[in-house]
Image: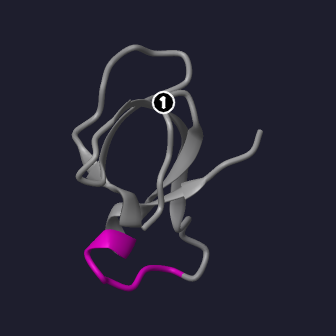
Amino acid sequence: MRQFAEGDFVLNAAPHVMKGKSASKFAAKWEGPFVVKEANENGYYRLSEPDSEVLLAPINAKWLKAYHP
């Protein structure tokens, strides 16, 4: 299982990827970058945009991948 720590930069899978739907071949598969603000032991993370403190809904680690600025 993927694990991220608070302060890590990550990319979030696009909604059409999470729903298993096809999209244009030019549609982005990843969104972000986002910053991990809360890391839970159960594999869920709370993210925010780098210049914001507003937390997004919890998301499972399987929909995230590391981003290296």
Q: Which residue is mark 1?
A: 6
From what the image shows, is residue 39 above or below residue 21? above
Report which quarter residue 47 is drawn in: top left
Viewer-proximal residue among 44 and 18: 44
Q: Position of residue 59 (x, y in %)?
A: 28, 50
From what the image shows, is residue 45 above or below residue 42? above
User: Residue 56: in sight, yes or no?
Assistant: yes
Describe the colour scheme in one phrase: one colour
Query: Amino acid under label 1?
Result: Glu
Tell me: 15 left or right of 5: left
Report which quarter residue 56 is drawn in: top left
Residue drawn at point x = 77 percent, y = 39 percent = 69
Q: Start and end of the magenta stretch?
A: 17-24
Tell me: 53 left or right of 57: right
User: Residue 14: in sight, yes or no?
Assistant: no
Tell me: 3 left or right of 28: left
Residue drawn at point x = 48 percent, y = 28 percent = 49
